[in-house]
Image: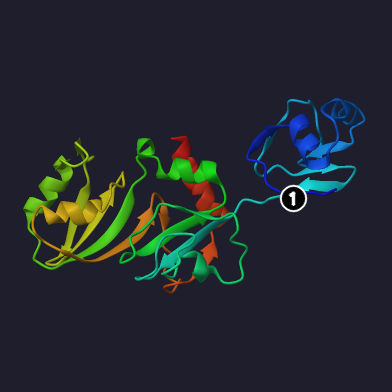
Amino acid sequence: MTNTSRSKRARLDRFVSQQTGISRREVRLLLALQRIHVDGEPAHAINQVIEQFSRVSLDGRILQSARAVYLMLNKPAGVVSATRDERHRTVIDLLGDRDTSDLHIAGRLDASSTGLLLLTNDGRWSRWLSSPEQRIAKRYRVTLAKPLTPDYVAAFAEGMYFAYEGITTHPAALTILSEFEAEVALTEGRYHQIKRMFGRFRNPVQTLHRVAIGSLELDPDLAPGQSRALSADELARLAAAKAQ
């Protein structure tokens, strides 16, 4: 029998046994006869680790052939960052005919917020990307109801104490672009953080648009609601940032 369900991480003998019904003792023999291949090469040990995207075959029959998916989407306002919602349209609904069964969101945006959103089926990648310890900057274009002053820049750079969580935010870079517009770079993502930080000045956020995550910038050719796969170069540049 052929089963293409996706293993997150498992020993080779356990994985093959689960996928085929063959005993783990028999898997040893299959391994010795080089009848099991992993990523195009004969498997080398019963405790060889099978990852989520390892390609595994037995006598040419595919047991697992999942591919990693990394998508960039230009999120419009009014769409929720969720895979399912009974009342609202979700970002998954925007993906059309793509296979979305295993996709999840790497870094959510509020329903009213717009801009760069990433979706993937690679849990390890999304956990790294969203981890506050990695200090990966997310940049946002913000419009405000009231004029900005240099006091904002200093307050954001210093960090703000949030009594509800009992934490002080990491320093954030705020650049004033015009009287009512600023760019904010955060290395964390607290609940409604940008809105709450501007709330200290009693200055309501009118629009919030994410323009970049690390080295990855929102493709200007993507209209709201459109998406595309990340390029090999974009993934490589993000991986380089990971290695630093």
For the C terminus, give its image quadrant.
top left
241 and 32: which is toward the camera: 32
Q: Amino acid at mark 1?
A: Thr
Image x and y of residue 47, in percent: 73, 25
* Side (left or right) of 26 relative to 206: right
At horizontal 39% and vertical 64% (from top left) the residue drawn is 80
Farthest bottom residue?
223
Residue 85, located in which quarter of the rendered image?
bottom left
Which element is circle 1 on? loop
Q: Quadrant of residue 117?
A: bottom left
Q: Is residue 227 above or below residue 194?
A: below
Q: Is residue 30 left or right of residue 133?
A: right
Q: Residue at x 53, y 50 (%)?
A: 235
Q: In the picture shown, does residue 112 fall above or below 127?
A: below
Instruction: From the top left corner, tell me how far across and down residue 207 is, in percent.
Output: 24, 67
Percent x, y of residue 182 = 20, 61
Kindly identify the residue that appears in the image at 22 percent across and 54 percent down.
Answer: 194
What residue is shown with label 1?
Answer: 4
Front position in the image: 65 or 219? 65
> For the point 53% across and 41% down, which residue is it?
124
